[in-house]
Image (tube, rainbow, N blue to C red):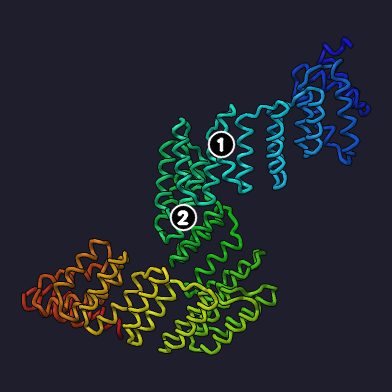
Amino acid sequence: MNIKDDYKLVLDFFNWVRLRRDPSLEALCIVVQIAVASKDLRTAHKLVFEFWGKPHLDVGYSFAQFTEMLIYTYKDWGANPFVFDVFFQVLVEVGLLLEAGKLFDKLVNYGVLVSVDSCNLFLARLSDGFDGKKMAIKVFREYPEVGVCWNTMSYNIILHSLCQLGRLKEAHNLLVQMEFRGSFPDVVSYSVIINGYCQVEQIEKVLNLLEELQGKGCKPNQYTYNSIISLLCKTGRVVEAEQVLREMINKRIFPDNVVYTTLINGFGKSGNVSAKYKLFDEMRHKKIVPDFVTYTSMINGLCEAGKVVEAHNLFYEMFRKGLEPDEVTYTALIDGYCKAGEMKDAFSLHNQMVEKGLTPNVVTYTALVDGLCKRGEVDIANELLLEMSEKGLQPNVCTYNALINGLCKVGNIEQAIKLMEEMDLAGFYPDTITYTTLMDAYCKMGEMAKAHELLWVMLGKRLQPTIVTFNVLMNGFCMAGMLEDGKRLIKWMLEKGIMPNATTFNFLLKQYCIRENMSATTEIYKRMYAQGVMPDNNTYNILIKGHCKARNMKEAWFLYKEMVEKGFSLTAASYNALIKGFYKRKKFVEAKKLFEEMRTQGFVAEKEIYDIFVDVNYEEGNWENTLELCDEAIEKCLVKKA
């Protein structure tokens, strides 16, 4: 028995014996007891772990034998209760959670409690699975009855489990109770609940908790900020999300590529490509390495904005950085090429994708079908659909919608209606886009009754019309000269809770301008503002051309100044209308100013306007300007037309 006081000798002898034969279970337990008593917990843990890591171990038998032997050798060879902690930890680490629970119960009967740190490990491992989370919550509630005093880490594990189970209210209540139970919530505790509320988009509760966290002298961590930025991006508040990023950086909490990618995605959804690029460049400047998710988001955003060349460059930059694009990345760029009408490049990329061993999915094929249909190549699109089916890919609603759109574009609306019926029979129920596409085709053919009939069919199927649906109908009414019906449509939209946008009003404004009924346009313009609809670039250009045609140059000039203040710009047609209008009213200074501005903007003036200013400069004796304008007029108005 005296040998136990010389731990080094014990260990050396044990290792010597192990080289010759497997030690008995009793010998192993004795050495583990002595190791723990000598505070060599690493060796004790290693020895127990090696035993339980053996392949083909009879768990039930071995557990009973090992437990009994550890208890049997406890008093004479160590008497340090932490030996049971080591055993408990190993059982948890090797995934024997049921046995760990049995050991805990057995030790309680002997008056021995496992440490709270070991219990936390048990809670954490239980929380890895869905059913385990429920068991972890049960353990958390029951163990204090036998004397376990949970700490902040314990609470954090359970808070996380409750949130993942969707029991957010319960988790928040537990956070409130922590202090009363003797554990103080830390930044992790708050961050877990904040993230939970972020997942369900309860921004007010998030902000209240953030304020409470900071009021207790805690600083939000990267996890807290990540959750808030993600929520703001998800709810479209990307400008505020970027402000949170700046606050985060100012507090010297440095964002990772996940935060930047979230923001890049957010700005992509809002169509702000310049902000995406700025963040992407900032990432690289800060040596934060973009991953393939970041690149895919950038490529997708650029393609949606029509910047396919920039998307192409980023795509091949991925290869140079050692990143392999996946199906999603390839599909994003293929879709970009298709939207730009670059079908040769789209199919070339599709072939490259296949050569790389990647399988085009239904989204890839739908992008190609849509691209072909927009070019009127419906027959080739149908062949592609057949190829898709042969590969076991089922077309979806988007695929059918692309084909229906293609058929409508080539004027084959009967076939489009037939395809919609086939789609319905196949179980791919037509959606709002399907009906809106067909309505648009009928409207362009002037068949408003059929378009109206489709609207009622759509409503009968409980499909909610979108602003696009109403704008299609508004365009149809206006093209057919049914302006009063257009006004009634706006009233009906408001009753349905759908707010008209600038495009809705622009269709009406354009038709009234054509009829030179400018008093009606003024009334509509006022109504827009009253309903909170802000005029866009088209609104101003339509009204300016209308007022110029009606010789209301004062009103046209007022609208011009207002639109410039709001950051909008004139089209070439609007410049031409204003210049001619001012010239006819002998407002030469204004006409000349606009002509010079138009040239600076790179627009081409009408030949009539060049003639005016060539004559003016000739009469004023400005030979140099006269010759310059003659050359410009010949190049831009005559040569280009030829």
**Which element is circle 2 on?**
loop
- Residue at point 82%, 18% (across, down): 34
Check the picture and name the quadrant holding the C terminus.
bottom left
Query: Split into 4 quadrants, where in the image is the N terminus?
Result: top right
Residue 530 in view: yes
- Which residue is at 80% across, 38% downward? 98
The answer to which image quadrant residue 330 occupies is bottom right
Q: Amino acid at mark 1?
A: Leu
Alpha carbon of mark 1 to alpha carbon of mark 2: how far?
26 Å
Left or right for 614, reference 275:
left
Using the image as rendered, state which of residue 516 and residue 376 is in the foreground: 516
Q: Is residue 604 visible?
A: no
Residue at the disc numbered 2: 235
In the displayed image of the protein, which residue is found farthest to the left? 620
Identify the residue at image location x=41%, y=43%: 246
Q: Nearer the viewer, residue 564 or 321?
A: 564
- Judged from the image, the secondary structure of the residue bearing numbered disc 1 is helix
Q: Is residue 457 above or below residue 501?
A: below
- Picture coordinates of residue 47, whole percent (x, y): 82, 28
Write down the residue under mark 1.
175
Decide which of 284, 63 is in the foreground and name it: 63
